[in-house]
Image (cartoon, coloured by chain):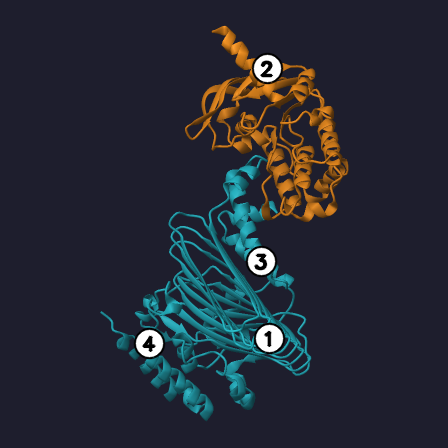
Amino acid sequence: MLDIKNLHVQVGDREILKGIDLQVNAGEVHAVMGPNGSGKSTLALVLAGRETYEVISGEVTYDGNNLLEMVPEERACRGVFLAFQYPVEIPGVSNTYFLKAALNAIRKYRGLQELDAMEFLPLVREKMKLLEIDDQLLNRAVNEGFSGGEKKRNEIFQMAVLEPRLAILDETDSGLDIDALKIVAKGVNALRSPQRAIIVVTHYQRLLNYIVPDYVHVLVDGRIVKSGGKELALALEDQGYARVEAEIQSTTTAHF
Amino acid sequence: MITMSQEQGGYLESFAQFENGAAGNGPGWLRSVRQGGIARFAELGFPTLHDEDWRFTNVAPIAQTSFQLALNGRAELAPRVLEPFRFSGPACSQLVFVNGRYAPELSWLQPLPEGVQIGSLAQALTSDQSLLEQHLARYADYQHDAFTALNTAFIEDGAFVHLPRGTVLQEPVYLLYLSTATASPAINHPRNLILMGDESQAAVVEDYVSLNGGVYFSNVVTEAVVGENSVLSHYRLERESTQAFHVSTLQVQQGRSSSVAAHAVLFGGALVRNNVHPVMAGEGGDCLINGLFLATGRQHIDNYMKVEHASPHCDSRQFYNGILDVQARGVFHGRIIVHKDAQKTDAKQTNRNLLLSDEAQIDTKPQLEIYANDVKCTHGATIGQIDEDALFYLRARGLAETSARNLLVSAFAGEGLQRMKVEPIRKHLEALVTQWLPQGKRLEEAR
């Protein structure tokens, strides 16, 4: 579904991603872990189409098409979804209005009938129940005055409504208490299917107790330095990133 | 080169003709008010950029145009030409003024509570002399404001709204001011008087429109006297053609525990000056000054607020949002004056501006004059462009860039609209603002 080859990305003069290779197939859940500043969020934002990041080389194909050539809205309409690390507050735009506009933009792109309020509401209600979202939250402006946990839950709620093919969760677990974390994980797990892929970007192993990944990748200084199964996440939790970094350092030195 | 005296000369000449004509028959007190107005205008002349209150607005285009007093063209107007401008909300009294004069044949009056008067000032000047003598031109300052002085000199017609003590108007009063195109630039001086007895309540809309473009000048003064414990919601809608000049003053005299909301939505006119001057004369009053100005092309919209706290325990809130595109220029000048005895004043001012182009410009200036020692006054202003993070967020959810951009602009405009509590009026204004927005029609369909 997603094929990233030798991706180099910079912001200003600084190179942040220094050659990423990653293949994600439908039905798989991948965790990308790494310390602060390793480039995790950059990877997530580049996949969603943020223009402030400049792709210097490499390629990204999504369902066989060049993802990098698509504007953000086209990616979204084709099923790419980014749950933001820092969801943006949009005063004056209600959550319902926003969600309906997004869903209809996507449906329109796919040649489906747009939903009116009568058709939209039952759909939303069902997902609200799943994520234990309060009615009142729906009428508030997008993310405005939401607590950190509410914002993250709102991201997953949007994901549940929009039903993407490729979901990228950027540190959705950061700042969540254990109850909120469980709700978020429930929402994500409900979306798991053989047709979908999920990339979980996280700093901590904790979320992976609830969203069990098929693959774990360790991102350090703009490169994936280690890949493995879910046990890799546990090893990281025990030993910390420093150990992995040191390990990499020594293998690199050994080569010379 | 036109000199100041030449600029004023035309007005003095018009005044002489005006006095010799219909105005000559008016009561003595009114004639002396008018004479006071023209005399003061002759002394003041038009303001220049050297006047602190006019620092950002050059009125030379008004001063240098030779305007003729507007003729009454209402006879030629078929009612259907008004249809696009009519208020589509619930049935309410809609008064139409053509070139500044009341047009009864185009107006719709609904049954009113006992004692309520809604009609023309010209009529009231003959039927309610003593009431008018007591209030007309007693509040709007024509000693220091040249435009108010000019309007005062030419007082002839406008709206007259009078609510006796204890009356509540359920439906708004809609005042539609329409200007027709004339061969040479015309000037009209609508003069409105709103008198509200104690414990009364009303919503009044003033809507300024152009029938078919052309250069003209609407020089408006509205005086509102709000009795004790009364509630006034006033709305000003400026949607004249982009060739029109518009200067208007809303002067409000607030009684004890009265509550006033002065709303404005301004998107018409070439050069617009919007003055709002509430005077909180009685204790415990509050006022909300809330506006939205939208300018594009080479439009210039200047908002000058002068909020006077003259008594203790009054609250004032100012919220003005500006959206400026292309080469438009906006001004927000928010003055708060707290008199010596106005202890426990709570005054707040917020001006937020959204610039949609690199060449659009805004000048924003708070001005606090505080003579009391136990008060709370705050002010804040922001100037910004479309938030790129918000734009990306919306696009990442599937909204096309133009829709996302429009949604953000409309949300910014919505902040002001949401404070307008009279629902049919708010909906009416929302629809008009949506049409103003680029690709607004499409956005409307998306809702």
Determine if marks 1 and 4 fall on one subunit. yes
Q: Which residue is mark 4?
A: B45
Q: Residue furthest left?
A: B1
Determine if marks 4 and 3 fall on one subunit. yes
Q: Chain of mark 2?
A: A
User: Which residue lies at the image location 67% right of the left edge and 17% below the top edge?
Assistant: A235
Circle 3 crowding by C-alpha within 10 Å: few under 14, some 14–19, many from 20 = many
If you read the primary sequence from the N terminus, does the residue marked by circle 1 or circle 4 appear first? 4
Circle 4 crowding by C-alpha within 10 Å: few under 14, some 14–19, many from 20 = some
Q: How many marks?
A: 4
If you read the primary sequence from the N terminus, does the residue marked by circle 4 or circle 3 appear first? 4
Query: What is the three-letter code of the residue carrying label 3?
Result: Leu
User: Which residue lies at the image location 72% right of the left edge and 42% below the top edge?
Assistant: A121
Question: What is the CA distance from the residue labelled 4 to the residue labelled 3?
Answer: 37 Å
Q: Which residue is mark 3?
A: B417
Q: Is residue A233 above or below residue B415?
A: above
Q: Which residue is mark 2?
A: A226
If you read the primary sequence from the N terminus, does the residue marked by circle 1 or circle 3 appear first? 1
Q: Chain of mark 4?
A: B
Query: What color is chain B drawn in?
Result: cyan
Query: What is the three-letter code of the residue carrying label 2?
Result: Lys
Query: What is the three-letter code of the residue carrying label 1?
Result: Pro
Q: Is residue B311 above or below residue A131?
A: below
Circle 1 crowding by C-alpha within 10 Å: few under 14, some 14–19, many from 20 = many
Determine if marks 2 and 4 fall on one subunit. no
| Rendered image: mark on residue B312 | 1
